[in-house]
Image (cartoon, grey):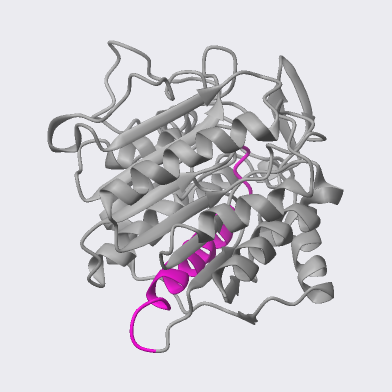
Amino acid sequence: MLIYANPRHAGHSGRQEMYRGRLVPCHEVPARLEHVLAELARRPLGEIREAPPVARALLEAVHAPRYLRFLETAWQQWVALDPANAALDALPSVWPVRGFRADLEPANFAARLGLYSFDAGTPLTEGTWAAAEAGAACAAAAAFSLAGSGAPRAAVALTRPPGHHAGADFFGGYCFVNNAAVAAQALREQGARRVAVLDVDYHHGNGTQSLFYERADVLTLSIHGDPRTEYPFYLGHADETGAGAGLGFNLNLPLPAGTDFAHWRAALATALARIAAFAPDALVVALGVDTYEGDPISRFRLASGDYLQLGADIAGAGLPTVFTLEGGYAVAAMGTNVVNVLEGFEAAAR
């Protein structure tokens, strides 16, 4: 197993987010990834590498060019408004909703920030773009590493900020660049005819779904909290099955709060059966471990030991696999839970 770790992830470190009507300390913090690296030092599973830079053309195959230009210059724009902003994170406060125009980019920074976001819980910081771009590089490198003779069975993009909530031209849910989508697109560009993206994060991968919703070459599947009660609320229902050429190539498996591992694993079996029927050349797993029973903002009941079985079940698909790191906010347990998935996969894949 090859592991690509993001050396710039800690540059993205939000101070506060809006949560349930209050400004609170961010749940998505650099320590999340540091715990995973510490656990990998205790239980090595493969070589840890630094990824080469990601090609801009690959990013633009996933995200709108004007959105990427905004992200890479947003911090400079924010500080240019007022030098005192350097001590603050940028959080949006206005958004274009139904009937508003989104085709014209406003001159006002606050309006631009709102144009490209969908919540007030995703602070943009001085190091956000560098961390997100380096994370995409990890995802691309992981995908490219699976090609050719002697390629590993699996590769990991160990990075933050996470990515699965980011769409073609929007950020939110702590996500700016969609790493799972970058990996899937990279696999397609290096010759995979079909790719499946399986999202096992507690929260629906709304960005990933929206990116591939009208495509038949990428099957998207998500097991997540019911969007009637769980973030991101506005996508993730079972009747969303794709559109146009992509009709039938999106599968949502929403589950109620309190779901235990036995019922969650049954949903995973359904997803894996659909993947087998699709017969992809490769699999991308958007690996969130906020399904953990101790997660502070999620409501499933998986125990740490269950993640070993989760990894083994995914290995049973028998596919070259890229893992991209997504959510998980029980910070101290993050390392154990992520490495358990990878260890379970490795043991079953031998």
> Is 167 contained in the magenta span?
no
Q: Residue at x 32, y 12 (%)?
A: 98
Examine the rendering and report whether any part of residue 295 can be seen. yes
**Magenta-drawn stretch contains 136:** yes
The x and y percentages for residue 302 are: 73, 37
Q: Given the current orientation, which residue lies at the most extreme left position?
A: 245
Left or right of residue 202: residue 55: left
Q: Position of residue 146 (x, y in %)?
A: 40, 76
Q: Quadrant of residue 224?
A: top right
Residue drawn at the location 75% of the way across and 31% of the way down: 301
The C terminus - image quarter: bottom right
Query: In the rendered view, does 184 fall on the left or right side of 223?
Result: left
Image quarter of residue 189? bottom left
The answer to whether residue 350 is above or below residue 126 is: below
In this orientation, which residue lies closer to the viewer: 73 or 144?
A: 144
Give the main secondary structure of the magenta stretch.
Answer: helix
Residue at x 39%, y 21% (from the top left corner): 238
Give residue 169's quadrant in the image: top left
* Left or right of residue 196: residue 249: left
Q: Is residue 252 above or below residue 58?
A: above
Reply above or below: 120 against 317: above
Span of residues in magenta: 122-149
Q: In x, y percent, where is residue 195?
A: 31, 56
Identify which residue is drawn at 26% across, 72% down.
Answer: 190
Q: Nearer the viewer, residue 112 or 201?
A: 201
Q: Is residue 126 visible?
A: no
Task: Specify the quadrant that holds the N terminus.
Answer: bottom right
Q: x and y percent of residue 148 in the render?
A: 33, 85
The total of numbered circles placed on residues is 0
Extreme residue toward the bottom, this view: 150
